[in-house]
Amino acid sequence: MENLIESLGQAKALALGGVLIGFVFGFFAQRSRFCLRSATIEFSRGVHGGKLTVWLFAFATALLATQALIALGQADVSTARQLAARGSLSGAAIGGALFGVGMILARGCSSRLLVLAAQGNLRSVLSGLVFAVTAQAAWSGVLAPWREQISAWWTVEGGPARDLIALTGIGRAGALAFGAVWLLAAVRWAWHQRVPVWGWAGAVMVGLAITAAWWFTAFVAMLGLDAQAAPVQSLSFTGPSAEVLTRVLFAPDKAPTFDLGLVPGVFLGSFVAAALFGELKLEGFSGGASMRRYLVGAVLMGFGGMLAGGCAVGAGLSGAAVFTITSWVTLSAMWAAAALTDHYIDRRAERAAESPAAALDQPVPVLSRSFPR
């Protein structure tokens, strides 16, 4: 691996790693129907359709595998932005809440929009573009002063102050035990709900893609070729989406990065999965009201994700897997805001004519009949 990275050069190796890991994530996210929005709706409505179990498998796998990797000394994540840099608890709470509202309105989080866009969903294509533009505006454009002001309300220093393992004193063993408990819970629910194999196995692969990214970027950083150009990171879609958009429009000659490879990698993986299983289909908006809803949701997710420092994957899986406090605050705010938005906007409109499961995403495809007993 070291020889390959040195022969390619650090920048190209990072981009290639982003493409490959992104491909795995995209392929299995498409097959498992991994979606935080659907998981939140199932939980808040008390529906047992398997989407919550799918999300939990991905979450628990990412957490357990990443902590095991750290415990074995195979990845040093202490320099990762989520842990080492100063964070914002106010940004995490407010940004997470805005993102949660937005993913209900847009009918999918940022990663799910990318997966659906690869299948031919034109609603997701437009929403994803608006999401990326808004994220860039929040990072360095017209919305940046608002982001900076809200972030400054309640900050937390980097290091132990952002590390929940250090704050709680549970240690690495406690973190591993925590992940194991949730993985066992996912297995139990999959058993009783007879979750199809694409659901639980695909979600496990989604979680392992998170861990793979932590390992790969930590390995490249360990080589010490260029520490600033090779940050330790995992998967996220707010910053990378904005970066890809900026590169395409303004800076195509900049050196490639892991994020630059990630977004097209996820798109390609999702496209291949949809093509192999006959799920490519052009879909558009049903009317003006529907379009407004998606665009408002995309704006809220773009600003909220940049304010919080992570999206449903960046905070909900990658950040949570390394136990950074801001990511857990973001994830909690996303769940709460999404559940409330679904209750007061979608559920009221659907209650009279549709079943509680009507707002959920595509059903998990069946490869075998159910979770094996």
Image (spheres, rainbow, N blue to C red):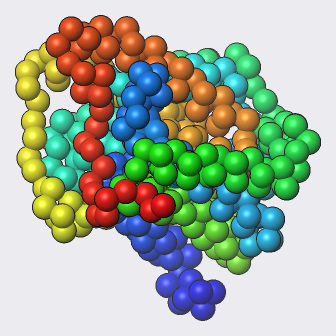
Residue 275 falls in image quadrant? bottom left
Q: Nearer the viewer, residue 235 or 220?
A: 235
Could you tell me residue 219's position as x and y percent?
67, 73
- 146 in relation to 88, above or below: above
Residue 168 visible to an observer of this rendering: yes
Q: Nearer the viewer, residue 94 or 348?
A: 348
- 365 in relation to 71, above or below: above
Furthest residue to the right?
Answer: 169
Total numbered circles: 0
At horizontal 18% and vertical 36% (from top left) the residue drawn is 123
Instruction: Report the side of 154 relative to 53 (left or right).
Output: right
Residue 338 visible to an observer of this rendering: no
Could you tell me residue 140's position as x and y percent?
48, 34
Could you tell me residue 110's position as x and y percent?
38, 40
- 311 in relation to 120, above or below: above
Quarter of the figure that contains the N terminus: bottom right
Could you tell me residue 258's position as x and y percent?
50, 63
Q: Nearer the viewer, residue 354 or 166?
A: 354
At horizontal 81% and vertical 65% (from top left) the residue drawn is 71
At horizontal 40% and vertical 51% (from top left) the residue drawn is 195
At horizontal 50% and vertical 84% (from top left) the residue drawn is 8
Residue 294 falls in image quadrant? top left
Instruction: Report the side of 132 relative to 284 (left or right).
Output: right
Furthest residue to the front?
Answer: 373
- 133 in relation to 71, above or below: above
